[in-house]
Amino acid sequence: MDIDVVRPGGLTPPLIAAWRGLQRTDRVWGSPFYSPYWARAIERARGDDGVAVAVISEAGEPRAFFAAQVGKVTAIAAGGAMCDYEGLVGDPGPGFEPAQLLRALGVGRYDFEHVPQGQAPFAPHARGVSLSWIVDLPAGYGAYAAERRAAGRTVIKDLDKKRRKVEREIAPPVFTAFSRSRLDFDRLISLKREQFRLTGQTDVFAAGWPLRLAEDLFALDMPGFGGALFTLHFGGQLAAAQFHLMGETTIHAWQIAHEAAFERYSPGLLLFQDILRWMDGQPYDRLDLGYGDYRFKRELSTGQLSLVHGFVGGASAASLVREAAYGVRRVAEALPLGPASALPGKAMRRIDRMRGLR
């Protein structure tokens, strides 16, 4: 087995074709975060040499690909805080250890947050599990809506009521897919930054390169990968906007916001409903809502994907520091301290989020 490390921009057409071929062999790898073009988009937006791709081959044939953001001592997912999925694309074969990636990348530790639980090489290094929420529509929106009702979910009924309320009180909602409105795109970014400020979250766009990333993806015109702006207008006014990443058959919810003036109508959820209906005539049959336990995700989703977080590290100071942090987190989460039990974990995630934005 050989591991060659290349820059995303240095991927040859045959390597890109092999990578995209592997994506089609597993539904999870169909996520746009596992595309070679995601790694390229991150490299272009960051404008540095910190993004690397490990190409794992056997007898000259690529078996797996692994994209990462590499520092002097540690590595994280390519895209850091902007990336919802990470890990291998493909099967390196029996006996593969993630520590081999550390040596190839020249780092002492790899920290991961969102590796699908099914990736066996990372299982021994996992320290916890979270869920990503998924809407699958193999038979279209009509069958999906019927399944939600049969499952005792009232979300479809409630949204239909909200839609009629908008029609009575304002005007019929106007849905636009793949909107090219720069005005609406800029308003979405502004709403997201305001949301970060009001909730005390880190403003990811303040780092500069994440904004360039979103703008690049908005401008990108490429089959099978890119960003798409979806909007909903009430009476000529923007009510909700969502900017999602697009794979070949998967849409991944990425940046979503709505105007507070229309909040009583749940415009963000109405927009999700319109996207799900629109998917009937498109090649997309999965809307991935991403990680985070929110009520709207539980109501809309038809399934979940388990993700693991942890780290891979050798005998190094960097690994000892991470091990100590997880030790504090583990002890706190085991104690009956109420909300305080979650504080170390929240602190770790916040620090990692800031690291991923540098």
Image (cartoon, rainbow, N blue to C red):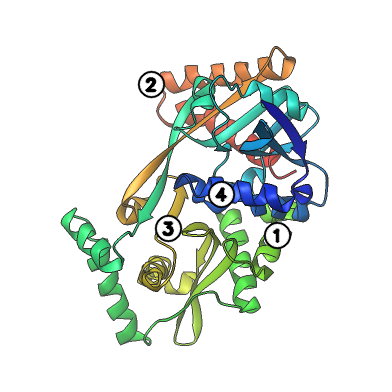
Mark 1 falls on what kind of element? helix
Of badges 2 and 3, the one in the foreground is 3
Q: How far apart are marks 3 and 4 (CA)?
A: 21 Å
Q: How far apart are marks 2 and 4 (CA)?
A: 48 Å
Mark 3 falls on what kind of element? strand
Residue type marked 3:
Leu
Mark 4 Cα within 10 Å, few/some/many (few <14, many 20+)?
A: some
Task: Report the residue marked by disc 3.
Answer: 287
Q: Nearer the viewer, residue 29 or 77?
A: 29
**Picture disc at residue 21:** 4
Of badges 2 and 1, the one in the foreground is 1
- Labels 4 and 1: the sequence-earlier one: 4
Measuring 51% from the left and 62% from the top, which residue is drawn there?
256
Measuring 61% from the left and 55% from the top, which residue is drawn there?
197
Mark 2 falls on what kind of element? loop
Task: Report the residue marked by disc 1.
Answer: 211
Q: Distance between the residues labelled 2 and 1?
A: 41 Å
- Labels 2 and 1: the sequence-earlier one: 1
Mark 3 Cα within 10 Å, few/some/many (few <14, many 20+)?
A: many
Mark 4 falls on what kind of element? helix
Q: Do the residues labelled 4 and 1 touch (CB within 8 Å)?
A: no
Q: Which of 131 and 259 is in front in this view?
A: 131
Mark 2 Cα within 10 Å, few/some/many (few <14, many 20+)?
A: few
Q: Do the residues labelled 2 and 4 touch (CB within 8 Å)?
A: no
Residue 110 pos. (x, y %): 66, 28
**Picture disc at residue 336:** 2
Figure check: 169 above or below 93:
below
Figure check: 71 above or below 336:
below
